[in-house]
């Protein structure tokens, strides 16, 4: 602070001196220019009187002292004579002093002489016969001299020295109480609440000292209580799994807990800022203004989340409103679980209802059936529906196990050998429908995945292909390596899938033709299981199909998976 005061004081003195010196030099220079121009004008007038008497012009002009350059110029601008001794001149008609003299009789200018290479002061007078008499003097004659610079330098140093001493004295007097208060505040900040300052005799400083001591006393009495309350409040807010923020009547933020910052992706300290300056909260605040009571809304950044908002007014002394507190409860997982539960219950209830209804209906009917042939037929239907119900429950359990990544044991396997097992297992089914089942596999293939899930994947695809292929059709399985991925293709010549259904066939319980699928024993979960397995392997699955010609499933899965590849399958329900 002391240095700043001294620098400011000295800077002010320097600027003032420079300004005064510059003004003095400018004024002196202008006065000397006026004086020189007047001398040149008088000299021109004096010489013209001699020229009008008929005296020899050259002799008259040569009689002028050497410091003054005399030039006689013709009416068209041609130089007739110049006392510098030079004879080769350019036309001077367009020179400023000549143009001014042509208009008003006299003219002057200050410029660099092209012939002499020095700055000159020119003054021209128009003669009665139209010619021009011009006199000039070098501008260096205007210098104030070396002594002036010496005097100015000495004066400048003397003034700076005296100003420095004066500035030090003033800054010390002004800063002494401030330094004492600075020291006292540092001690108070370190916990020395009994520290006080000396009250000065001067009225202004005495008032400042008294106010400071009074403030320190109040701070001492209230600090501990406030600190204890603040610690309790911060502990509560940090431990909450809900966002909490509060702002006063001036819309200034007074509370903003860490969970709230995380919820909206806000960084840095926001305490004291205007609540409407936080762009992430504007939409929330506008929604609160338009609705009363608790409400639910969805935020998109930094993550898509559903939140429940509750607000309440804060009242201070005398039951006056001092602000508003807002509590934000993250209900994203709750909403998601509720949606999943609702969908799952609805789908499972629907799928279980059909076989159970059939079993119940035919079992009740059997009580009144006497014919053995009819009774056996009903028993066969009950058995088929029981098997279908078993398959449905098994698929639900399989899908649940895959979604939760239970019992997954990734290892290096031979995908061709594992696929051959499925090939031999399903060959009798294919032959029963007179379907040609073929397989091609590239030698030396390896894959890092769970063996059981891989077999489940191939089994579901090939079983579906056989199921929806007409007699005399064909189903082909091929495995090959494409760059760093294992490519699996299951292609059939079956009934095909319409284009409008292709985007939804991997949804749970979705069927292209419900009546036909149930008749074929489908549960609606096979392709959902397939996609969960593929995504769990970190791969992709595509389908190409044409009605009446067949369907082609294409799978790409990495040969070497990352250790955390299972994380890629989190939240797979968003896909289905």
Image: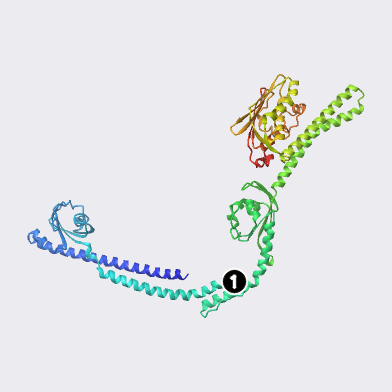
Say whether residue 428 is visible: yes
Left or right of 21? Residue 398 is right
Q: Position of residue 88 (x, y in %)?
A: 15, 52
Residue 359 sits above or below residue 261 on the image:
above
Q: Position of residue 42 (x, y in %)?
A: 16, 65
Say whether residue 576 is visible: no
Residue at 78%, 33% in the rendered image: 392
Q: Quadrant of residue 169?
A: bottom left
Report the number of numbered marks: 1
Residue 483 sits above or below residue 76 on the image:
above
Viewer-side residue, 514 vs 444: 444
Left or right of 30? Residue 56 is left
Viewer-side residue, 241 vs 123: 241
Q: Position of residue 542 (x, y in %)?
A: 64, 31
Circle 1 sits in a helix, a strand or a loop, which is it? helix
Viewer-side residue, 48 vs 371: 371
Q: Which residue is mark 1?
A: 188
């Amino acid at each position: 602070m002391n240095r700043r005061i001294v620098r400011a004081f000295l800077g002010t003195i320097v600027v003032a001196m420079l300004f005064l010196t510059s003004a003095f030099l400018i004024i002196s220079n202008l006065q000397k220019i006026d004086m020189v121009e007047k001398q040149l004008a008088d000299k021109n007038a004096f010489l013209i009187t001699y020229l009008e008497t008929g005296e020899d012009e050259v002799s008259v002009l040569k009689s002028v002292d050497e410091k003054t350059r005399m030039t006689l110029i013709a009416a068209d601008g041609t130089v007739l004579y110049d006392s510098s001794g030079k004879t080769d001149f350019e036309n001077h008609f367009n020179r400023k002093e000549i143009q001014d003299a042509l208009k008003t009789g006299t003219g002057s200018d200050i410029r660099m002489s092209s012939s002499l290479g020095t700055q000159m002061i020119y003054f021209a007078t128009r003669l009665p016969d139209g010619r021009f008499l011009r006199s000039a003097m070098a501008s260096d004659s205007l210098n104030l001299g070396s002594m002036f610079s010496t005097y100015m330098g000495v004066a400048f140093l003397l003034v700076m020295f005296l100003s420095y001493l004066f500035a030090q004295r003033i800054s010390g007097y002004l800063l002494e109480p401030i330094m004492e208060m600075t020291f006292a505040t540092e001690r108070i900040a370190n916990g020395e609440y009994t520290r006080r300052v000396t009250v000065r005799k001067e009225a202004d400083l005495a008032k400042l000292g008294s106010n400071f001591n009074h403030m320190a006393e109040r701070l001492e009495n209230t600090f501990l209580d406030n600190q204890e309350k603040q610690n309790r409040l911060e502990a509560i807010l940090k431990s909450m799994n809900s966002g909490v923020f509060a702002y006063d009547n001036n819309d200034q933020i007074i509370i903003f807990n860490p969970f709230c910052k995380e919820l909206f992706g806000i960084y840095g300290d926001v305490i004291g800022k205007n609540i409407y300056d936080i762009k992430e909260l504007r939409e929330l605040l506008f929604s609160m203004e338009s609705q009363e009571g608790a409400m639910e809304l969805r935020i998109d950044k930094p993550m898509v989340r559903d939140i429940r908002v509750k607000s309440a007014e804060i009242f201070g002394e005398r039951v006056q409103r001092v602000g508003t507190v807002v509590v934000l409860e993250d209900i994203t997982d709750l909403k998601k679980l509720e949606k999943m539960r609702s969908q799952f219950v609805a789908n499972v209830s629907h799928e279980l209802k059909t076989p159970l209804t059939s079993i119940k209906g035919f079992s009740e009917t059997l009580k009144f059936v006497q014919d053995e042939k009819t009774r056996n037929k009903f028993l066969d239907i009950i058995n088929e529906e029981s098997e279908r119900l078993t398959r449905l429950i098994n698929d639900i359990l399989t899908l649940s196990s895959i979604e939760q990544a239970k019992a997954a044991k990734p290892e290096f396997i031979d995908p061709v050998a594992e696929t051959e097992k499925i090939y031999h297992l399903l060959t009798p089914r294919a032959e029963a429908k007179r379907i040609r089942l073929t397989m091609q596999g590239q030698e030396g293939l390896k894959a890092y995945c769970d063996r059981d899930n891989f077999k489940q994947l191939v089994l579901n695809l090939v079983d579906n292909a056989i199921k929806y292929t007409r007699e005399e059709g064909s189903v082909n399985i091929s495995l090959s390596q494409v760059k760093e991925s294992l490519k699996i293709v299951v292609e059939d010549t079956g009934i095909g899938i319409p284009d409008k259904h292709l985007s939804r066939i991997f949804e749970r319980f979705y069927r292209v033709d419900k009546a036909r699928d149930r008749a074929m024993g489908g549960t609606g979960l096979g392709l959902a299981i397939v996609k969960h397995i593929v995504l769990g392997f970190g791969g992709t699955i595509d389908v190409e199909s044409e009605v009446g010609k067949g369907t082609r499933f294409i799978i790409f899965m990495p040969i070497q998976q990352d250790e955390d590849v299972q994380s890629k399958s989190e939240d797979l329900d968003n896909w289905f």
